[in-house]
Amino acid sequence: MPLTEQQLNTLRNELLKRKQDIEHRLHGGDGHRGLSDGQRAQTGELSLIDNHPGDVGTETYERGKDLALVEHDEFMLERIVSALKAMEEGTYGICATSGKPIPYERLLAVPYTKYLAEYNPEQEVTNNRPVEEEFLDPPFGRSSLDEHEYNGFDGEDAWQIVSSWGNSNSPALSENREVHNYDEVEIEDGDDNQGFVESYESFIATDITGDNVTVVRGPMYQKYMKQGEGEPLLEPDVNTEE
């Protein structure tokens, strides 16, 4: 159903109001949210050398956030101007993909839209990731050595020890896009050896000189022998065999 003149006027006024608000933010006295000034001028510091890295990081983060907000405003302004131009050309309210009329209720909610809800390209959640993450693939970047068949202590082991004391991970920050609760945010199931690399290290002992090797025949030793991992390095424990 075509839009009435009254509906078009209502939508035009809404677009003009939003346009004015964005232009005020972009070109007002704050100078693009203060981004027209350098970080040194904005913080009032003559030098950042003697500052704590956390303070500098906070300032850099805030400037990055402001930059994203400015880019968003510029993007929205472009869409609003495009919608006002479509009104002048008589093509406003027509879906750019299907050619069908866009309901007035949708235009009231999103007056700058060019699409019906079902044809909106922005409804897809993108899987695009920052290019910097390529440097961190696999997890922990170059400090994770599992794929190289390295059994020593690496970056992943270090993280598991630190994270055992708690962390701020949430499902939203997980590298796994299918995580939906806090019980699933761990990278691995935690079954890795704790305090040793090879299983036999948990029950092999020596004196202070490194000589006089002894075997502590505890649960790990029994599990090791039962799995047949020790043959022929270790003799079966005849005292514990049935």
Image (cartoon, rainbow, N blue to C red):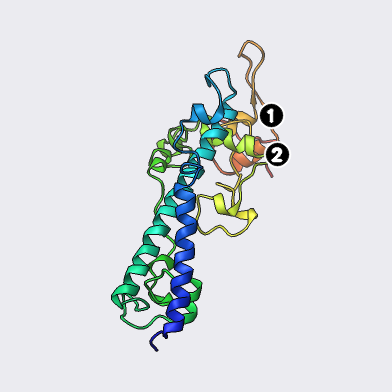
Q: Would you say 211 lies left or right of 26 here? A: right
Q: Residue at x 44, y 47 (%)?
A: 27
Dot 1: element:
loop
Q: How many marks?
A: 2
Q: Which residue is mark 1?
A: 216
Task: Indicate the position of residue 141 as horizontal and vertical percent values.
Answer: 44, 36
What is the crowding at mark 2: few (fewer than 14 residues within 10 Å), some, or many (at least 20)? Answer: few
Q: Amino acid at mark 1?
A: Val
Q: Residue at x 63, y 10 (%)?
A: 209
Q: Amino acid at mark 2?
A: Thr
Dot 2: element:
loop
Identify the image quadrant of residue 224: top right
What separation in Å lies between label 1 and label 2 (alpha carbons)? 13 Å
What is the crowding at mark 1: few (fewer than 14 residues within 10 Å), some, or many (at least 20)? Answer: some
Q: Which quarter of the rendered picture does the N terminus lie within? A: bottom left
Front residue of 143/75: it is: 75
Q: Would you say 187 lies left or right of 112 here? A: right
Q: Looking at the image, do the residues carrying marks 1 and 2 touch, with CB atoms under 8 Å apart?
A: no
Q: Residue at x 49, y 64 (%)?
A: 17
| Rendered view: 177 above or below 193 | below
Front residue of 36/207: it is: 36
Q: Which quarter of the rendered picture does the C terminus lie within? A: top right
Q: Residue at x 66, y 36 (%)?
A: 238
Task: Indicate the position of residue 227 as horizontal and vertical percent values.
Answer: 57, 44
Q: Which residue is mark 2?
A: 240
